[in-house]
Amino acid sequence: MSQLPVVPHWIDGALRPGNSGRTAPVFDPALGIETKQVAIADATEINAAIAAAKAAFPDWRDQSLAKRQQVMFAFRELLNARKGELAEIITSEHGKVLSDALGEITRGQEVVEFACGLNQMLKGEYSENASTGVDVYSTRQPLGVVGIISPFNFPAMVPMWFFPVAIAAGNTVVLKPSEKDPSAAIWLAELLTEAGLPDGVFNVLNGDKVAVDGLLEHPDVQAISFVGSTPIAQYVYETGARNGKRVQALGGAKNHMLVLPDADLDLVADSAINAGFGSAGERCMAISVVVAVEPVADPLIEKIVERMGTLITGDGRRNCDMGPLVTKVHRDKVASYIDIAIADGATVVVDGRDGTFDGAADGFWLGPTLVDNVSTSSKVYTEEIFGPVLSIVRVKSYEEGVELINNGAFGNGTAIFTNDGGAARRFQNEIEVGMIGINVPIPVPVAYYSFGGWKNSLFGDTKAHGAEGVHFYTRGKAITSRWLDPSHGGINLGFPQN
Ligand code: NAD
């Protein structure tokens, strides 16, 4: 029997140890050792979490808007004061460096702040005297129990894309975090309770496919917000829809940065480094392909390589630039693309396997890697690598670059680097991608806009947070009302017309 601590569930306002007999390992990626296990839910625990959320819904729905808002404000204050604790938890299970973990929390906190003002977005419309003596108005109401299923790469930010909006709108939540880094969700649950959220409004169900399927199939779950890889996003979308649920399923990505010859190459090189190697490339908005319009490739590569030489990869607690990959399995998979690149005739300019690392010998290390002359038929180009492997593809013109990007299967994010406003304007119009940066490498929209891609990066038509998030977690009613005045009388079987 393992003596490691087991991360439990959080159901009805309390920690609930797993009873299924199944657990999964949780690693500290910089140490390369299993430090914890996580409970993997079975049907009893799935039903308990959903039942707690269902029982909490009527009271939470009926709380005044002011009360719901107060809880959000209190949560925001606690989170802001204590986010250092959460960052340490994230680094110890995900591996990203502490400053980046804090950055992810800050982006999640933006959504909490957006939710603090959600009452403004929940207002209905009113038309007085739509017909004589008849008023028509609309209102939006919460759905009930909503499921949130999140990926490993943002264990705090991705849940926070959703639950603040869902809760402020009056729903109750069951969150199923990634089994690779489950502790952030439990920490957030405890903080929500401290902020005054009633028991059962927010529950954390740890688990794997069994828990996901349980949420997708349960009749008491009204809606599912999913973020993860494309094949699972598609599966979640189809299965949820078949079971009559509202689903938004955000999938994988392969984001390109188009560099025109007039761009500021120092800015481009800095941006390529930050967006390619930040969080070890484990970001859905990471840049994984630099599309260089000739003759820009050679001078740009020189600047990128120069900067790569200064990066320190190591334990995220030691002030390094880049941490390890999340698991050994993932590290080995990412490294295998370097062999594929060589086999497919690309030029490996910098091989991250050769690096030195500021951390334990067994950490899941892979240094920043740069591959030039990548063929668009190679798996290095067509597949999402999700690691610190940056590809260069050379093209002859702006048009060739746009065609390349538009032919891609994903459409999450992209960026253009240029000093030509006309070219940038044309790009934002022609490119078939959901989030676009102009001289901005990772164009994650602020919380009061909505986050989501096109094509295989989003199944369903509603994105996260902003107006679309509010719309997703509420449903509309239109009310037609007449109050009789003392002069009323008469029969008329036709439609009222004026
Ligand atoms: P993943 O698809 O493996 O897992 C996501 C969630 O689905 C986890 O909670 C996991 O437990 C669950 N899951 C895994 N396999 C399942 C199965 N067979 N059936 C049902 N549920 C299953 O993704 P990941 O590796 O945790 O995260 C990385 C992926 O997420 C990348 O593809 C990345 O691009 C994507 N991502 C996308 C966005 C976005 O906004 N589009 C944001 C973050 C991450």
Image (cartoon, helix red, strand yellow):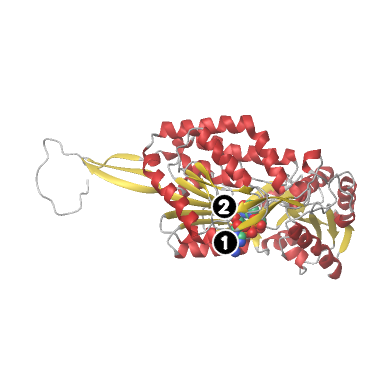
Give me the residue at 84% from left, 66% from top: 339
Judge whether 56 appears above or below 458 on screen.
Answer: above
The image quadrant where one finds the N terminus is: bottom right
Residue 209's tag is 1
- The amino acid pointed to by label 2 is Asn
Count of numbered circles on the image? 2
- Under 8 Å from ligand 1: the CB of mark 1? yes
Q: Position of residue 51 (x, y in %)?
A: 42, 51
- Using the numbered discs, state the Cα–Cα distance from disc 1 to disc 2 in whole angstroms: 10 Å
Residue 206's tag is 2
Task: Determine crowd level at label 1: few under 14, some 14-19, many 20+ residues with C-alpha closer than 10 A.
Answer: few
Nearest the eye: 474 or 64? 64
- Under 8 Å from ligand 1: the CB of mark 2? no
Q: Position of residue 338 (x, y in %)?
A: 83, 63
Position of 402 with respect to 42 (left or right) is: right
Q: Is residue 395 visible?
A: no
Q: Position of residue 429 (x, y in %)?
A: 63, 53
* Helix, strand or loop under label 1: helix
Task: Determine crowd level at label 2: few under 14, some 14-19, many 20+ residues with C-alpha closer than 10 A.
Answer: many
* Helix, strand or loop under label 2: loop
Residue occupying the far left of the picture: 490
Q: Position of residue 119 (x, y in %)?
A: 44, 35
Nearest the eye: 425 or 453? 453
